[in-house]
Amino acid sequence: MTSNPSKPTFHTDRSRLFKDRFAKWGISAGGVMVLIALLLIFFYLLYVVQPIFESAKVETRNSVKLTNASQVVGVGMEEQTEVAFLLGETGNVDFYNIEKDHFGKKITTLNAELPSDVSSFASSAPFQGQYAYGLENGSVVVVAPKFLVTFPNNQRQLTPRLDYPLGDMALEVDDQGAAITKFAFSHYEDKTAVVALTADKRVLFSSFVGEENMFTGEVEWVVERTELDIEGRVDELLISPDTTRTFVRSANQIYVYDTRYPSEVEQIQLLAANEENANLVSTQLLAGANSLMLANDNGEVSQWFEVNTEDGREFKKIRAFETSKQSKLNIFTEFYRRTFFTAGANGELGIYYTTSDAKLWQGKVSDGPIQNFAIAPRSNAALILADDALKVVEIHNEHPEVTWSALWQEVWYEGYPEPGYIWQSTSASDDFESKFSLVPISFGTIKAALYAMLFAVPIALSAAIYTAYFMSSELRKVVKPTVEIMEALPTVILGFLAGLWLAPLIEEHLPAIIGLLILLPLGILLTAFGWNKLPNSIRHRIPEGSHSILLIPVVLFIGWLSFAMSGTIELWMFDGNVRQFLTNELGMTFDQRNSLVVGIAMGFAVIPTIFSIAEDAVFSVPKHLSNGSLALGATQWQTLVRVVLLTASPGIFSAVMMGLGRAVGETMIVLMATGNTPIMDWSIFQGMRTLAANIAVEMPESEVGSSHYRILFLAAFVLFIFTFIFNTVAEFVRQQLRDKYSSM
Amino acid sequence: MVTQWFKSGSPWIWMTGGAVSISLISVLGLLAMIAWKGLSFFWPSEVVQLELQGSVAKQTVIGEIYDRELVPKSRIEATGVDLSHYEKDELERLLIKTGNREYVDLDFRWVLETDIQSRTAPAALAVFERSKNGNFYGYVEQVFKDGEVITENKVEVLYELVERAVELNDQALDLQNGDIGHINYELERLRLKEKAYQLDNELTDERVAELAQARAELRAEYSELEKQLFALRKEAKRDQVTVKDMRGEVVTLPLYQVLDVWFPNDMGFFAKLGHYFAQLGKFVSDDPREANTEGGVFPAIFGTVFMVLLMAVIVTPFGVVAAIYLHEYAAKNAVTKMIRIAVINLAGVPSIVYGVFGLGFFVYMLGGSIDQLFYPESSPSPVFGTPGVIWSALTLAILTLPVVIVSTEEGLSRIPSTVRHGSLALGATKAETLWRIIIPMASPAIMTGLILAVARAAGEVAPLMLVGVVKMAPTLPLDGNFPYVHLDRKFMHLGFHIYDVGFQSPNVEAARPLVYATAFLLVSVIIALNITAIGIRNHLREKFRALEH
């Protein structure tokens, strides 16, 4: 800065120049910031959404050769995937360190205390973490490897131990003492159920309930045994973790038993479950225990679950997965999610997800057959026993439930009678099957926007045309800002009025609302006709272009009339209660907060947007065009329709687009004026849930990084893209129009 | 004749005119309704005593007439009420607010017109506004001052005693939130300090002793203050009043729960007016009570204003710089076009999308990183990695950026280019022209943009639900504890208050007038801001129009 302008020095000029440059770059950077902000939103949303469409990845962590691999009957690992345990055929349990740095170091071997020799082995559902040995004397011992976490010297240390969840006593499954050759078990709450095949070919279902002896304080087992009647050989036994269902596979047939009440075990179904030209090789229960997964020797895996049919609940085949063409497939399942793994005899591993009908990964993990397999509790790693080695693979499979088809196509969910579009994101239980169909909420968005536009477009456009073309300019100066002030009205207030004032009002006076729709146009026409008949002396006293002022009392009167008559009409035509009439006579459900309410309230929010842009478009049509048309003898109306509107049509189109963009993304009104139920029904008397409202309702509760969280981001992204297209097209059209006008 | 009339197009003109009338009626009707419902709530309405008999057992009902509606006779008859002696098709029923929530099942009840045997408004009926359980209606029986019955001028004494109790309660609350709150805050800071030392392995014995001493001092101070607090509370509990309610039973009301007492049927117009303004004042200056369904909205007003001002501070420089770039510097090229599209889109993207972006980017990414870097000691509880007022302000700043840009640019385009040329011709650089000439001239336009942005932000709720608003914030983002401004705190907001009280509260009927009052407050602020902005803009237009000629 120069202190003396008459003597500018070289130095100060340089500093001024520098400042000028600096300002230029600074301001340009600031301008580009706007673009960056938009791009940031776009890419950030994309960045959060993108992982759900990634396929699963499998990486080998490490492997170690084992000397006694052939004797291992069961494997498992601890939650942090630091320790693996291998259960041997004699009741010995080996613990190995499987951390990256000390991989393969044997920690210890613990021996289960077994009263007799081992004749068979079984493991529980993965999330229960229990394993059991069937013994030569007809009893079963359940063990559970557990880890004690200590922090000596601030170092995390795991000390393995073996727990006996049912106490030290073996469960006497067969009171005749025959060796147990095959069995399945589940320990659920205070109940333990075992289904076992004995050496003398009997199939026994036994239920054990622990009861404390009142005098000695010892736990005594109350046993109930039922012999199941199976024809032919028994291949596999399964029991659901909650012990309500028991399955016995005999060749290609599956016997389904209802074992809810141990005293009344009942066969409820006999499934012939093999695929055409194929035989069953193995079965497994999916997490949540509602689905039965069946592997065939042609490599097909089918999913069956119970659905309501005419004959009650029955197992039905829902879908099939084409896996590798392996004749000996084993199926393994995850702890909580609906992922299942297929392990083939040639060392091929496949990862599938049932709900989304998705094949997530397939590849070879070993040269020889996979002898045993276990998934980590957090589903982030798996233990593979193959080629006489213990191998750990890391699995990156965070969002198996989301695929394009699961989001947008009909999916048959567990327990539902048929495939459907369902949004139901959360539930109390861990093994809940999430239902992420975006179809019902997208449908709701479109429905809400459509009803709003149905209400808003006619009023907003008519009002815009009148204000811009017919209204006197003094009046226009008042009317335009008044309507536009509505745009500033917070939508939370419109939503609150819609939910707490309009919804009950409409419910009470439904005939009045319908009446308004019919009476308003009629009344306006009648007034116009009457006005036309009035002598000129009166007509000329009112200035041109103030029809709308004249009509205000008319509209008010019609409004009052409709509401005053509402009760009488209701009494007269609908027995005094329209709601009951709708439900009983027409079979329509009537929600108090319905689409009609949303349509009116959101229409209200959209009217000023459309009005403002459309009014500008009509008003800026060059006057010489309309004057020319009038001079050629066209009437006002003809000029308007044939000349003015035609010229302004791109602007009007852009106004409607802008309005639609606003209606699609509106949150508070829909949130407050509907019941937010994600149903798919066009009925005007029912509510909906929209994308925006869904985000507002569920986002605060969703866990960061979960599939649910990312799907909500996807919903936001869809809204973003939607409105981006609407706005950009509208702006583009408007720009074109402006250029056109300026050249006229 | 009629067909010709239709052909002339005149009916269609009338129809379009009708659309304007409908829009006008809806806008003005809506505003008038909000104003009426919001403002009438504070008026001390008459308390009536109704003697009922008919479809209900003989009883007395005391309360305010809250609402009335006409119902078809058949619908009432369907519920098993005998109305054979009644002739009209419809009959009126009244919604009575009976208060006395802890003694009756419902504090609102519908009363059929036909059941009312007599209706009086005795002057002796008193309304007690209480800090718990809502209003109480009844006849004052006896006033106890320190256990003694007051015999003379009991109403005047009652007024005095209520005032005294309110005063003592206020003192106790001040003590609790002020000094005691301060000690708790300091104790928490000491805990964090200790943890920070521990994390850095700098926790020496000396420091342990220091911390222990500081703690001991604070605790001593605390027990002292606690004694004072208990003394105040005990003092406040001294007096009682006994009231006969509509069941005819005499109920003792401890005065420390009474906030105000008045006799609406005994008040003249000016007394009522005075009471009205006192209630209005309490509404804007008090804290909410009873799960937000009663009391005032002060924290919500404060939170809204604080957040909006914070946002204004953030958005103004960016918006103005972007507008100057677009109008003064930008060349006509693809980048400029893209920036313009970006501006349009930023204005059009649904606000909830900003909320989602703010939650993910600002709260979890930015806030999470800040916590890791600067607040490792308070983990696992987040400081900035959780929704808060700063993130709300930032989110809304992006949302309102286009408002400021568009308005500023409009202002810039109204400044005649001759002004710029003059300045440049006199040897000023472009930056100097901008700084000395253009920006001062455009400042009213910038102001307009800012006001519009503030108005927009004040009414926005959806994004705030994700990035920082809560239904009940225990502390304001501004208080007497170091560092005085707490940008990480959650806050209350008028718009969210409306949503929360109107839709999430257990007693919607009781809360409704309060929601209308809050809505009126919000609407009037926003409309006032908008009208101011429009006024400034029009003034500016006139000014520059004069300059051009």
Image (cartoon, coloured by chain):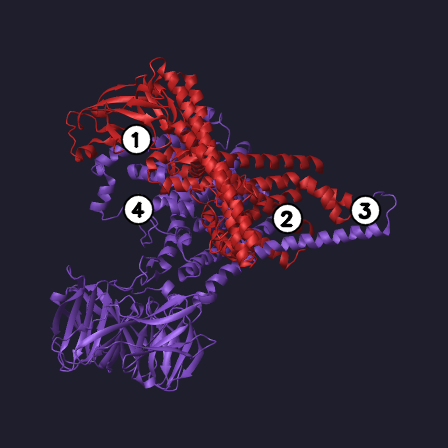
Q: Are marks 4 and 3 on the same chain?
A: no
Q: Which residue is mark 1?
A: A564
Q: Which of the 4 image quarters holds residue A390?
A: bottom left
Q: Are marks 1 and 2 in contact (CB under 8 Å)?
A: no
Q: Is residue A528 above or below residue A143?
A: above
Nearest the eye: B69 or A49: A49
**Residue A508 x, y percent position in the rendering:** 29, 37
C-alpha distance separating marks 1 and 2? 54 Å
User: Do labels 2 and 3 touch, CB within 8 Å?
Assistant: no
Q: Which residue type does callout 2 highlight?
A: Ala
Residue A685 placement, left or right of A491: left
Q: CA distance from mark 4 to mark 3?
A: 71 Å
Query: What secondary structure is found at the residue carrying circle 1?
Result: helix
Q: Position of residue A120 (x, y in %)?
A: 23, 80
Chain B's colour? red
Q: Does dot 3 land on a helix, a strand or a loop?
A: loop
Q: CA distance from mark 1 to mark 4?
A: 23 Å
Query: Mark 3 highlights which residue?
Result: B427
Among all residues in the image, which is located at the extreme right?
A7
| Direction from residue A654 to residue A707 in the image, left or right | left
Q: CA distance from mark 2 to mark 3?
A: 24 Å
Question: According to the image, label 2 marks what residue?
Answer: B323
User: Is any atom of residue B412 visible in this view?
Assistant: yes
